[in-house]
Amino acid sequence: MTLTVGIIGAGRIGKIHVDNLRRIPQVRVKSVSDVAIAHLEEWAKEKQIEILTANYQDILNDPEINAVFICSPTTTHANLIKESASAGKHIFCEKPVSFSVEETEEALEAVEKACVKLQVGFNRRFDPNFRKIRELVQAGEIGTPHILRITSRDPQPPGIDYIKTSGGLFMDMAIHDFDMARYIMGSEVVEVYANGAVLVDPAIGEAGDIDTAIISLKFTNGALGVIDNSRQAVYGYDQRLEIFGDKGSAQADNNRANTVEVSTAQHVFKEKPLYFFLERYTQAYIDEVNEFVTAIVENKEVICSGRDGLQAERIAKAARKSLEIGGPVQLQPADQSAVSINL
């Protein structure tokens, strides 16, 4: 079976997906749409894209296209999911699905009604190190989980224009960590307590956001979690994780250019972490599209579903509310169909 794909949005992440999809023998990347296509013509020719269009409807109306990748701005995701599902296309959508829990729920209802697959782009689930940690937890190697610690720090903050439209640190950045917490723990979050500050750039605060956060989580299985976020780690992209249980612990350290450690009388030296997410998660981006394609071709469940995306959004909303009220926010323990206070 050849899977014919259309890409909606040809920014940085859309181009990454094109490159990774072209590695897969049974995939044909037929069409790419973007609101500004003039500067994409040479790129599209180089990548052997058959159709370059400014109208995404050309992709949805093409009967040859089996699946779409939604790589456009977040504010467009929910409607594009609904339209793609109505057109009978399988869907890969970048995170988050939307900034609104209600809009996300509507999009998921459309997917369910159309009986198509939806995978959300939480690429860190596909990182080989983090996947190994999950396997160890599921196999009982560390026993009953007690504490999860996630460190996630960017090397430098994004531009202020991006900050203003990003949905905030919890929805834009920490949402990856909320998904990772659920993925590693295999348990839902029932309480969120967030503290935040503006310590990197005052302009971020003036834009209504924070750049530094500590987030405490409680899970249905009784375990605790701690996430620390910063928009600026001057030494590189700091991505670490530790799970501690009654039989031991497991840790995933940063990826580095090499693992050589030099020890002398003057110093002990090793390479800094890889600088940014494109380097750190190269393999994860490859693996997530491979597994999406496999899910369609072999009719399997996707690894990161629309519900996973919805749950991460709910935690992000609760974190924002916690920051505003200065206290913990409870989430419903059963299905988290609502947060116990109005978000």
Image (spheres, rainbow, N blue to C red):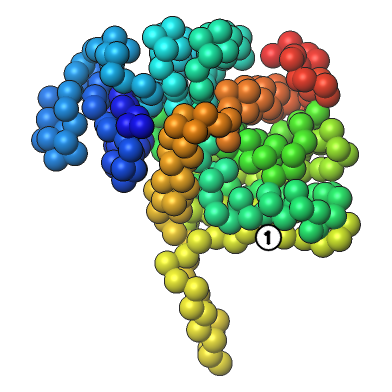
x, y (%) of residue 202? 50, 36
Q: Give the quadrant of residue 50.
A: top left
Depth check: give the residue in front, 215 or 95. 95
Residue 169 visible in this rendered orientation of the protein: no
Say few, some or many: other residues with alpha carbon within 10 Å of mark 1 (under 14 / 14 to 19 / 20 or more): some
Task: Say which quadrant the C terminus sits in.
Answer: top right
x, y (%) of residue 137? 75, 51
Residue at the spot of label 1:
251
Q: Amino acid at mark 1?
A: Gln
Residue 159 shown left or right of residue 175 in the figure: left
x, y (%) of residue 148? 75, 48
Depth check: give the residue in front, 133 or 232. 133
Depth check: give the residue in front, 187 or 2. 2
Name which residue lies at 14% across and 40% down: 46
Q: Give the quadrant of residue 336.
A: top right
Residue 322 visible in this rendered orientation of the protein: yes
Name which residue lies at 17% across and 23% down: 51
Residue 151 shown left or right of residue 297 in the figure: right
Name which residue lies at 12% across and 25% down: 38
